[in-house]
Amino acid sequence: MENFLTDNEDILFHLEHIDLDRIVRLKEEDFKDAGRYPYAPKDEQDARESYRLVLEIVGGICGEYIAPAAPQVDEAGPVLANNQVTLNPATQKAMDMFAQADLMGFCVPRQYGGLNMPTTILSVAAEIIARADASFLNFGLQQDIAETINKFASEEQKQAILPRLCSGEWGSSMILTEPDAGSDLQAVNLKAVLSKQPGEEGKWYLSGVKRFITNGCGTIGLVLARSEEQGSEGRSLRGARGLSFFLYERDDKMIIRRLEHKLGIHGSPTCELQFNKAPAQLVGERQRGLTRYTMWLMNNARLGIAAQAVGIAEAAYREADLYAAKRVQFGLPIRALPPVFEMLTEMKVAIEAGRSLLYETSRFVDLKEGLEEYSDKHPEEKGEIIEEKKKYAKLAGFFTPVVKAYASEMANKVAYDAIQIHGGTGYMKEFNAERHYRDARITNIYEGTTQLQIVAAIGPVSSGIAQGILDEYDRADYSHSPELLVKVRAARKLFDETLEYAKAYKGHEQFVTYHSRRLVEMATDIIQAYLLLRDGTHSERKRRVAAIFIAKMAPRIEANRNFVLSEDGTLLKNYGEVIGGV
């Protein structure tokens, strides 16, 4: 039986060596569920074994069923008729298999029927699933929606909804985007009106249009809507302060106007929705819909997209490597030719660097969430707990856009190179390479484009958060590779020099913003170098991976440094004349 967990030595390496003990203790609240629920772990080792068993189930379903069905799902997709979406039969069967294996409540507490898995393990599962079929988004989406409801909804709402999400009875969707409000969610105009009718206290009605809604046919939706036009003093609340968050259960007051015809991820229904006074419930507090609830949901989703991107890249690389081993040219398998094996090696190293970054980010998110929950339940504890909570909140806030940017751009490059290695055959639909290429393209667009991730990451880079974690990484023991550490420190010195120059530059007020992508990519490179060096503590092979990554990183760092330091704002001074109309 093919299994997408057990055939991936790098994932198995991380599962063996990743530091999860504190995350497990926080997630399990010192194992209070042991003996109360089936399979609840009694200690850290028991939890790790449970994680491995669950991931093997995921890997088995993916390898044996989802991946073989993916080409057919891509070809046919879902169908819309009479305001109802019918998933492709293979997609629906996969959903049923996940539900029967009790996987749909992956991260939800056991009291609601979930498995109570940490985000780090969810990232592993999401990557495995995306390798099998990147369009099978229902699983990850279900976790994001369920976790958001668990964190912010009332107990009554949680009791009513979470068990049905965990059982797979209900699907769900994140209903944010509008025709005129893509990345700029402050521009959301879908109206939410509080009923004034007797007997309808607390009931809201939604009216308007949402677009590009993944799985918009789901029974449950979390909707961002404009609940306020002005404040108590008569001031306009047109921006984020006028938005609230709502829980909507599918009824006949919402019409699915169309399914989008997309370049890739064809198995996932992307819907345009029209709400016609559809009843909904407020989640949490009014006016915090975007600033708190949506941002939390989107950060979780961005981490999921990073995992999806790593999974697509893994699939594309494997197709390319398999083809290169079989394709003979000039009397040799093309895998033996330096131009090809260099491409394959760079693809493999880039994926492993992305995986290390993905799991490190997930770890920070788990620690942030675990410490926040612990702090809420133990308000008497202050001091170190409070400082740790702040630390991991900052790190999660920094690493999430960084990994989303890196992994999605990396997946696009790997999928592009996979077609190149296939040559003309890779351009044909009979080969999976072109599907991976099409699927990869959305990852650096949805849940915030790469440009928006850079905007989110440049603040922590310029404020010292990036330098703080680099200092922490630098204090670790790399005695196994002192010569590589010297190279990473040299790159770090160039980065620090470049950042200081950009921050001090007086020639143009947008100078740091203009160079933000170069600065963020420099920081990302150095972070990944340290992570791969850390991985090398446990493996000679990983030390070789680190050596290749660092050798390729050095000229990138130097090129970015040289450009920023020699640049006098030429583009900033001239772009208006070049592109016109500015």
Image: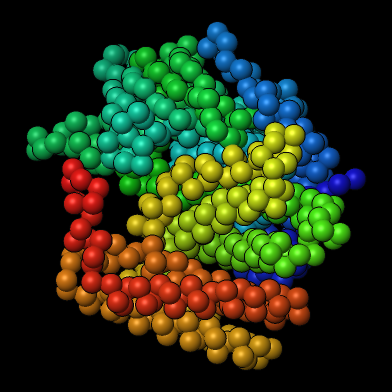
Tally the marks: 0
Q: Is residue 38 shown to the viewer in this render?
A: no
At x 59% / y 39%, what residue is drawn? 438
Residue 487: quarter of image: bottom right
Q: Quadrant of the N terminus?
A: top right
The location of residue 360, given as percent across then percent down, is 58, 66
Quadrant hosting residue 324: bottom right
Q: Colour scheme in the image?
A: rainbow
Q: Is residue 539 left or right of residue 450?
A: right
**Residue 335: x and y, percent?**
78, 61
The residue shown at (59%, 78%) is: 551
Residue in the foreground of this view, choosing between 536 and 264? 264
Q: In x, y percent, where is residue 478?
A: 63, 87
Residue 114 versus residue 350 in the image, above or below: above
Q: Position of residue 226 (x, y in %)?
A: 28, 31
Q: Residue at x 40, y 43 (%)?
A: 294
Q: Is residue 47 above or below residue 278?
A: below
In the rendered image, the vertical position of residue 73 relative to residue 465, given as above or below: above
Left or right of 197, for residue 311: right
Q: Is residue 520 above or below residue 3?
A: below
Q: Is residue 371 visible?
A: yes
Residue that extends furthest to the right in the rendered view of this protein: 1
Q: Of residues 92 and 225, which is closer to you in this image?
A: 92
Q: Nearer the viewer, residue 264 or 94?
A: 264
The residue lying furthest to the front in this view is 330
Q: Residue at x 79, y 40 (%)?
A: 61
